[in-house]
Image: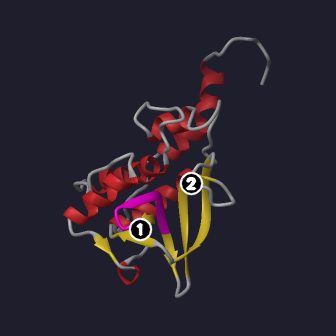
Amino acid sequence: MEVTGVVDAGTFERLVAPMTKALAAIPANGRSLGELVAAYARQHLAQHPLEVGGQNRGPWVRLYMDGNEGQQWPWCAGFACFCLKQACDTLGEALPVTPSFSCDSLAASAEANGRFVSRDQTGPGSIFLVRHTPTDWTHTGIVISTSDETFKTIEGNTNDDGSREGYEVCARTRGYGKMDFINI
């Protein structure tokens, strides 16, 4: 690109291209809600969303957190709920749980809607919650696939070390210990 010092339409288009790609509709093509949630999570991951300008800040965080950002806005639940909403919109279905930026509120909604399940009832597109205590959850993300000992995820506000206060969207492999699940 030619350096002009002006953000013209072409420059702006290139700056927002990753977000535009992440927001593109995915055709349902017979997929279930869970399969679409996982597909949208993969689509976001491919664009490498990350924080910009400090902890829980930047355009990706604002996207997932309905315009909110800053230290007091951890965004893992916002990311998971955003992908869920994209999938529901594609299928024209109502959200199966009340979206929330809070892991605890997400768990409460799942329990109230009969969607809180054991690991044996989880699959692609389900939402996992990291349990701190029986009534406190500290991190969440989207289940991509399961096996006997582990499950693969895509999750926001994490990093390759698995921190719940990371800086990007990552693919991870997790064990089942201290996990609860929301069936989508």
Q: Spot the residue most to the top.
A: 5
Along the line of sight, which residue is nearer the eye, 61 or 54? 54
| Residue 156 horizontal/vertical position (percent) | 54, 52
Q: Is residue 101 left or right of residue 139?
A: left
Magenta highlight on residue 139: yes
Could you say which disc has been placed on residue 175 in the image? Answer: none
* Magenta highlight: main SS: strand
Q: Secondary structure at mark 1?
A: helix
Q: Spot the residue most to the bottom.
A: 148
Question: From the image, which quarter does the C terminus lie in?
Answer: bottom left
Q: CA distance from mark 1 to mark 2?
A: 25 Å
Q: Residues within 10 Å of mark 1 (few under 14, many from 20)?
A: some
| Residue 134 horizontal/vertical position (percent) | 36, 68
| Residue 111 horizontal/vertical position (percent) | 25, 65
Residue topped by disc 2:
164
Q: Amino acid at mark 2?
A: Arg
Q: Amino acid at mark 1?
A: Glu
In the image, residue 67 sits, relative to residue 101, either above or below, namely above
Along the line of sight, which residue is nearer the eye, 38 or 140? 140
Q: Is residue 28 left or right of residue 24?
A: left
Residue 128 visible, this orientation? no
| Residue 121 horizontal/vertical position (percent) | 35, 80
Q: Earlier in the sequence, mark 1 or mark 2?
A: 1
Residue topped by disc 1:
35
* Magenta highlight range: 133-143
Along the line of sight, which residue is nearer the eye, 146 or 18? 146
Q: Image quarter for residue 131?
A: bottom left
